[in-house]
Image (cartoon, rainbow, N blue to C red):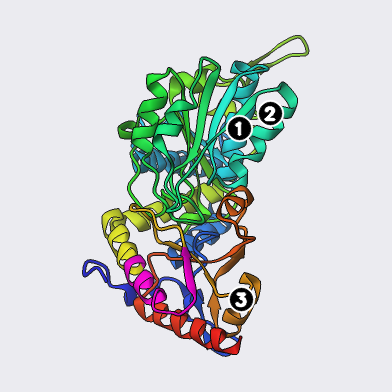
Amino acid sequence: MNKAMNIQTIREDFPILSRTVYDKPLVYFDNGATTQKPRLVVEALVDQYYSVNANVHRGVHYLSQQATELHEGARETVREFIHARSTNEIVFTRGTTESINLVVSSFGDAFMEAGDEVIISVMEHHSNIVPWQLLAARKGITIKVVPMNDQGELLLDEYEALFSERTKIVSLTQVSNVLGTVNPAKEMIAVAHAHGVPFLLDAAQSVPHMAVDVQDLDVDFLAFSAHKMYGPTGVGVLYGKEEWLDRLPPYQAGGEMIQHVSFEKTTFNELPFKFEAGTPDYVGTTGLAKAIDYMNALGLDQIAAHEHDLLVYATERLKGIPDLRILGEAAEKGAVISFLVGHIHPFDMGTLLDRLGIAVRTGHHCAQPLMQRLGVEGTVRASFGLYNTKEEIDLLVNAIERVRQMF
C-alpha cells in the first residue's frame, strides 16, 4: 500500500463501503463498470439542488448566475485536469458513449464518404465499435481492426500497415476494460499524425487511474465519463482540439447550441456550446468537478501507485489458485484482472462470489469481438479503485477457493 494514502481514512469517505451484502462485508471490485461516490460529491449534488438550482446561461437572476458560475467553473476544472489549452475544447456530454457517438456522427458526416476507412482495435468496447458500424451502414465506410498478441498487446507493426490514403480517423481505447492493457497511446497517435490522420482516444478506463495530458499526447479527441472517476452518472466529457471542433457540424440541435434562429436560417453558437444542445446536467458537472478535486487532493500519482500495488498483489495471489487462468498479461497493465477458473462458468462464479459479499463483473464486458479473439464466452473481472485493499483481495482469493471446491 502506498504510504502517501491512508486507505482506511479514505474508505470512510465512501459510506456504501461499510454496508453488508448477504450478512457479509461488501467487497466492491466492479470499479471498471462504475465507481462508488465519496460523501463530498453526493453532498455537493444535494446542496446545489437545495440552494443553487436554476437553469444556466442567459438567466439574469441571481440563482441562474450562481449555477452558471458553478457549471463553467466545472469546465475549467476539467480543462486543468486533462491539461487542455482552452475551455472551448471541453464539451459536456452524458458520458463516454455519447462523446464517441458525437465524433462518429459529426466527423463522419463532414469528412467521410464511401470507401473511407477508420482504424479501431480488437479490444474496443462496443461503444467504440457499433457507432462506426452504423456509420458504415449509412455511408459505406470501411472498418479496419488492429490485432493483438496472446498477452493482450496491440501489434504496432500491423497497426501502421493498416493505414492507406483512404484512412480518415483512428479511434482506440487507452486502457482495455477487459484486459487492463495500457496501450502506447502517445506512440500510436504520432503514427496516425505521420499519416495525416486525426485520433480519437477512449479514456474511460484511463482518466480515473492515471494522469492524462491531452497536449502531451497531442490527441485530437478524447472521451471519458464522470461515473467511472467517483463522480455522478449521466455526465461525461469530450475533449476536442479547437481547430477540429470548429470544423465539425453540430451533433444535436435545439436550445443553447444556437446563436440566432429564424425560419429562413439558423446560426450556431460558439464553442463549446455548439455541441451542447438543451439544458445540460449542470448539477452533475458540479459533481464531476468535486470528484476531480477529490482525486487531485489524494494525488494521481499516489492513486496510480496504490492501484498498481493492488494489481501486483492480486495477480500473485490469484496465480496461486489451481486451474485459475488470467486473460491479459500485458507488460503495461492497469488495475483490472479478468480470469476463469477451470470449467466454472463466469456467471456461476460471479453469483456465488456475490453470496459471499464480493461484487465482481461477469460476462463479455461489452467487448464480444475481444471474447471471440480470446476464445471464450466471457470472464470474471475484478477491477480495483483507490479505496480497495489487499485485505479485500485476500477475501476474494479465499472466496474463489471456496467456490472452486464446490465444483
In front of the other: 53 or 205: 205
**Mark 1 is on which residue type?**
Leu
- Given this view, does label 1 or label 3 mark the residue nearer the observer? 3
The residue range painted magenta reads 311-326
Give residue 354's quadrant in the image: bottom right
State the image coordinates of residue 331 (x, y, percent, origin top left). 33, 53
**Mark 2 is on which residue type?**
Leu
Q: Which residue is mark 1?
A: 102
State the image coordinates of residue 326 (x, y, percent, origin top left). 46, 65
Q: Earlier in the sequence, mark 1 or mark 3?
A: 1
Q: Earlier in the sequence, mark 2 or mark 1?
A: 1
Q: Is residue 264 left or right of residue 172?
A: right
- Given this view, does label 3 or label 2 mark the residue nearer the observer? 3
Q: Which residue is mark 2?
A: 135
State the image coordinates of residue 154 (x, y, percent, origin top left). 44, 42
| SS category of the residue bearing label 1 | helix
Q: Are marks 1 and 3 in contact (CB under 8 Å)?
A: no
Q: Could you give the CA–CA distance between mark 2 and mark 1, rounded to whole angstroms?
A: 12 Å
Quadrant showing the N terminus: bottom left
Quadrant showing the C terminus: bottom right
**Badge 3 local density, few (<14 within 10 Å), some, or many (20+)?**
some
**Vertical arrangement, residue 182 with respect to residue 86, above or below:** below
Q: Which mark is residue 344?
A: 3
In front of the other: 196 or 319: 319
Q: Earlier in the sequence, mark 3 or mark 2?
A: 2
**Mark 3 is on which residue type?**
Ile
